[in-house]
Image (cartoon, grey):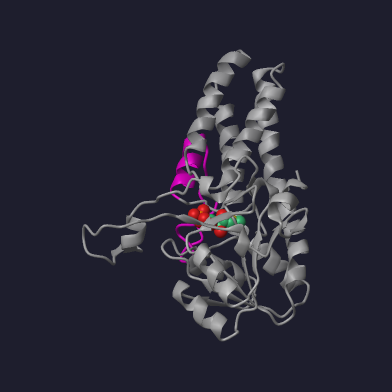
Amino acid sequence: MIDQTRLPVEEIYIECLDYKSVSDAIRNMLIRGAPAIGVAAAMGVSLGANKINADSYKSFLLEFQQICEELAGSRPTAVNLFWAINRMKKVTKDNNDKTVDEIKKILKDEAIKIWKEDIAINKSIGKHGQELIKDGDTILTHCNAGALATAGYGTALGVIRAAWDAGKKINVLANETRPFLQGARLTTWELKKENIPVKLITDSMAGHFMKKKEIQLVIVGADRIASNGDVANKIGTYTVAILAKEHQIPFYVAAPLSTLDMALTSGDQIPIEERSHEEVTRINNKTIAPEGIDVAHPAFDVTPNKWVNAIVTEKGIIRPPFKENIKKLF
Ligand code: MRU
């Protein structure tokens, strides 16, 4: 996998040969973005399963469950992580009559299937979502919901890519996305590579450009969407949604169905990850705040469904009322 903590300065690929290194890569955000960590976790489960020395299904399962638990503990908010691990658990249980070696092969195939499916899903999200974009539009995005955050192509950036490929002359404003700077480091890097016009702005500039009517729509990804359409995404998304509402600018979310958590009735139930305070007090190993300063660092926030104009999925565009319309897709 590409080490996203080194981008955009260095494009370095790391090799994970066991599930512990996959779990560490997710925890330390070498790989990040909801669908990408789901795919990585599935591959981590397969790597872990391969190394289990067991002669019966029962003893295999014991170690297998512990591997799944460790991977599931790597990050709490993006539901795709648990979705992918549960899929790996399900194929194991569904094949409990097979030999351990056969199960290992089935798990490998399933991880590869999850990876390939994700790329196809993103292309489909792009195809549906690009209809929301008009020729000449300037689009604001927050965080990185691109190829890096998925198995490829991206969700929110997939929509942008599809609009560009359809020949629409668009411009992108990328919020830098403090504190981890996914917008500054990753979104700009991805779009620049493909010559899609992008301008980097700091998070505090978004309102200014909306007021000047220089933004026609907002599109972001999601880490978890409750069954009522409340959306957890990178910290700062909530603020962007309120700004968009005030300026009558449509606010769209692009995400695969695996990001929808039908077990939750409201976004208030979504666990919000609190990350290291050093991510706030330091940039590129340089201290930017007084030693010992008190810090808060919720990595995500929840945007209420009332401020979301549409959710773009691989099955099409969902519009309000979300509770009823989301249910129809399952
Ligand atoms: O903390 P991160 O970088 O993993 O957070 C990622 C985001 O919030 C993305 O916007 C979201 O996962 C959508 S990715 C297709």
Residue 17 picture location, percent across and down:
52, 38
For the question of whether residue 258 can be seen, the reply is yes
Using the image, determine if residue 198 lies above or below residue 151. Answer: below
Foreground of the two, 112 or 33: 33
Quarter where residue 174 is shown: bottom right
- Depicted 221 relative to depicted 86: above or below: below
Verify whether residue 37 appears in magenta.
no
What is the x, y in percent for residue 280?
35, 60
When asked about the image quadrant of residue 125, the answer is bottom right
Q: Is residue 75 left or right of residue 294?
A: right
Question: In the image as oriented, which residue stretches furthest toward the bottom?
Answer: 212
The percent coordinates of residue 80 (x first, y second) are: 60, 45
Q: What main secondary structure does the magenta stretch of the protein show?
A: loop
- In the image, residue 202 above or below residue 86: below
Residue 196, quarter of picture:
bottom right
Read off the magenta span: 1-28
| Ligand 1 quadrant assignment | bottom right
Viewed as shown, does residue 73 lie left or right of 56?
Answer: left
Residue 69 position, x and y percent, is 51, 31
Residue 105 visible, this orientation? no
Q: Residue furthest left?
A: 291
Quadrant location, the C terminus: top right
Q: Nearer the viewer, residue 114 or 81?
A: 81
